[in-house]
Image (spheres, helix red, strand yellow):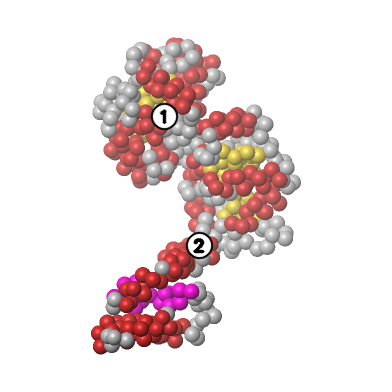
Amino acid sequence: MSITFDDFNLQPDLLEGIRSMGYKQATPIQAQAIPHILESKDLIACAQTGTGKTAAFLVPTLSKITEAKYDFTSTLVLVPTRELAKQIDDQVEGLSYFTGATSIAIYGGNNAQNWDQQKKALTSGADIIVATPGRLIAHMQMGYVKLDQLKYLILDEADKMLDMGFMDDLMKIISQLPKERQTLMFSATMPPKIRTFAKQILQTPEEISLSISKPAANIDQQIYLVYDNQKLRVLQHILKDAQIQTMILFTSRKNAVNDIVRSLQKMGFDAEGISSDRTQDEREATLQRFRNKQLQVLVATDVMSRGIDVDNISHVVNFDVPQDAEDYVHRIGRTARAGTKGMAITFVNEQDQERLVKIEKLIERELPKLPLPEGLGEGPAFDPIGNSKRNSRGRGGAPAGRGGRPEGGRPEGRRREGSGGGTRDNNRRREGKPRPEKAAGAPTEGAPATPRPPRVEGQPQAPRAEGEQIKRKKKRRKKPAAQKTGEGGQPAQTASTTSSAE
C-alpha cells in the first residue's frame, strides 16, 4: 500500500508547498522516517543517495517549525560539502514557499560580500541553518551565532563528514548546543564509526536501515583492468564511438581533474571539472550548465559527488574504484533511471582489485573483465589476493618505489649540498672532535664530492669502500693522541694526511 504525504497530518501550508513541487507518494525512507520525527524521537537512518532522504527530514521538521512559529533559529543541518548545503537550502525554499519559514546556507569559498550576507542572516535568526562544519565554526568564533535555543539538529551524509575528517569540528559544534534537542542522523552507509558516533550524540534513537539496492539490470557494467598510465588512453578508445548524452566521471584525486578534462576536450567532448580548488561561483555555474545539458561530461571528485543531482545520465565512469563498495552502487545508480539504459565503466588497477571483489560480493554478481582495446598493451592480471600481499610487503619500502627515487636519495642530496662547509669539519678534526654524524653505520658519507654509484654496478667495490671508511674513522679517533705527541711541527703533517684521506 502506497503512502502519500496527506497521510502524515502535516501543516496545511506545508502540504501546499509539497504539492507544488510535485511530491505525491512517499518513498520508503520518507514513509518510515517522517512519523518518528513528528513524534520528536531521535533517529539514525541509513539510506543510499537518491532515495528521498532530504525530504524525509525536511518535511516533518518544517511542519513542526511552521506550527510552533519560533522567533529564533530552531534547526541546524550539517552537511559535508557546499554543493549539498546549497541543494538542501534550495529544497527548503521550495517546500516552505507558503509557510514563510526562512533558511540560510553557510559554506566557505566565498568572497567578503557573501560572508557579510551570511553574518546578517545568522544575526537576524533564520529558522534553518544549513552549514558545512568548518565555515559554521568560523562564524561561531566571532560570537554572533546564537544556537542556545536550538530544537533540531540534523546531520546529513554523516559517513562522508567523518571520512573528510570533520569529527572534531562536529563535536565542537555539538558541545555548544542545548542538550535537550531532537537529533537526526542520516547516512548512506553504516560503518562501525558511525554507530559509535551516534551513541555519543543520540538519545535512545529509532533506527531505520534500508538495504542497499542492487544496480539496475539495465546498467551495462564494464570493468577494465589497467595500469594507471593506461587509463586516459583506454577512456579515449572506449568513448570514441560511444553515444554520450551526459556523463559523470568520478576520480578520487582532485589533482587529476584538469588532466582528465583536457583529454576529454581533445576527444571532442564539452567537458568541465568540479573540485574544491575552484571557487563556489565557478562550481555552481558548472553544475548549472551540466543540468541544462550544455555540458556533455562532468568530472568530479568523490568529495564533490555529494550534492550532484542530475537526471538522464547516460554514462558513469569510475576513473578510480571508490573506497566503499556502497559508493559504487550510489555512483552508477545515477544512470539508467526511469527504465532507461545506461553504461558504467570502471578502471581497476592492481591496488584496487581487492575493492572490486568487495563490490562484487555486495551486488552478488561477478562483473566481466573486458580486454583492453587493441594496441594499448596488456593490463595487470586479475589477482586480488596476490596483489594485496605484494602491496602489503611494499608498504614498508614505499619511499624506495615512489617516483623511481631510491630510498635515501633525498637525504644524500642534502649532504652533498652541504659538503661545501668543510671548514667547520676541518676545525672540528683539528680540535680532535669526531664528527657525530660519521657513525659506524653511515656508509653514505664516504665521498661528498661525487655521488655514490648505483648499488648494482658497485657491488664488487662496496666492501672495500666500506672497509676504507672504517679505517678512516679509526684514524680520526686516534688523532687527539697523535696531536699531543707531535706538537711543534706534527700538526701540519697530520692535517695533510687527513685532507688526503678525505
Range shown magenta = 433-449
Amino acid type at mark 1: Ala
Location of residue 248 with respect to 136 vertically, above or below: below
Residue of label 1: 131
Q: Is residue 445 part of the magenta span, yes or no?
A: yes
Predominant SS of the magenta segment: loop
Q: How many marks overall?
A: 2
Residue 100 appears in the rendering: yes
Amino acid type at mark 2: Arg
Image position, residue 131 (x, y; %): 41, 29
Front position in the image: 345 or 375: 375
The residue carrying pointer 1 sits among few (fewer than 14), some (14 to 19) or many (20 or more) residues within 10 Å by Cα, namely: many
Q: Is residue 389 part of the magenta span, yes or no?
A: no
Front position in the image: 500 or 212: 500
In the displayed orientation, state which residue is furthest to the right: 241
Residue of label 2: 402
Image position, residue 264 (x, y; %): 67, 45
Q: Residue 386, labelled with which disc?
A: none
Sequence-first tag of 2 and 1:
1
